[in-house]
Amino acid sequence: MLSVQGLSKRFGGVHAANAVNLRVEAGEILAVIGPNGAGKSTLLNLLSGLLRPDEGRIEFLGETITQAPPEVRAWKGLGRAFQIVQPFPEMTVWENLLVGALYGKPNTPARVAERVVEEVIELTGLTPKAQTLAGELTLLEDKRLELARALCTRPKLLLLDEVMAGLRPSEALEAVELVRRIRNSGVTVLFIEHLMPVVRALADRVVVMDYGQVIAEGPYDLVASNPKVREAYLGRAS
Ligand SMILES: Nc1ncnc2c1ncn2[C@@H]1O[C@H](COP(=O)(O)OP(=O)(O)OP(=O)(O)O)[C@@H](O)[C@H]1O
Ligand SMILES: [Mg+2]
């Protein structure tokens, strides 16, 4: 579904992404993990178009999208949710989702956009909160809204950056269930996560980054016992 070759991005002297190669298969849930500053968010920003790479190539569904703006990528089926949730606080949940449904596609007929919102609001369990102002939601509801907003762009591949951060363990489990439901609805998922129980529960495959490079990849158990991976985490004393 997605293929990345030799992707690099520097910030001054920092090589935030350093010749990254990556493949995402249709239907899988892929986790990207790594210590703080490893370059995970940078990779996601390069994939979603928030950043442009210095070098390398991104192909999505057989098309090169390396230089495409974010809204074009969204329109082609690349959706994303953010590490820091940023809903419009003065708008209702419903209105926030309608914005998502129209993102990059302003000519969508209102009826079509509303139908998308109805489906997504149901899938994400937000139906009882439809008329609540986004600014009045709990953290867990906020996370649901962020996921829902990304889903409203009708992604084929959903990119998630630490959407479980700050949740209590029981809430994280609910969020895990929701991500599974999203995948089962036909959406491929690439997620960044530092909560290892979540990674273990969700990921079909894990990619590990350190200093901008992919240092390991494979099933969770294999990656977790990889000496290079253990060293990357222990070496930062975090
Ligand atoms: N806009 C920017 N300007 C300058 N440096 C940046 C910028 N974005 C990221 N960096 C640097 O690039 C490196 C990778 O950062 P990135 O945010 O991608 O890491 P991360 O793996 O997402 O970390 P975390 O787990 O803390 O979220 C870090 O050294 C960071 O300081
Ligand atoms: Mg990050």
Image (spheres, grey):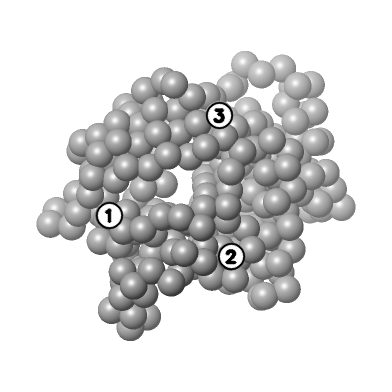
- Estimate the x, y position of residue 171 in percent, counting from the top left: 71, 69
Q: Which residue is mark 2?
A: 200
Q: Nearer the viewer, residue 211 or 151?
A: 211
- Point 38% across, 42% down: residue: 22
Question: Mark 1 or mark 3, which is nearer the start of the sequence?
Answer: 3
Ranked by sequence position, the earlier of labels 3 and 2 is 3
Callout 1 secondary element: strand
Badge 1 crowding class, 10 Å Cα cut-off, few under 14, some 14 to 19, many 20 or more, is many
* Residue sitting farthest toward the bottom: 237
- Is residue 131 visible in the rendered image? The answer is no
Q: Which residue is drawn at the image coordinates 48% and 39% (left, top)?
A: 24
Q: Which residue is mark 1?
A: 213
Amino acid of disc 3? Gly
119 with respect to 21 (left or right): right
How many angstroms separate mark 3 from mark 2 (CA)?
26 Å
Q: Whole-Å distance between the Cαs marked 3 and 1?
A: 26 Å
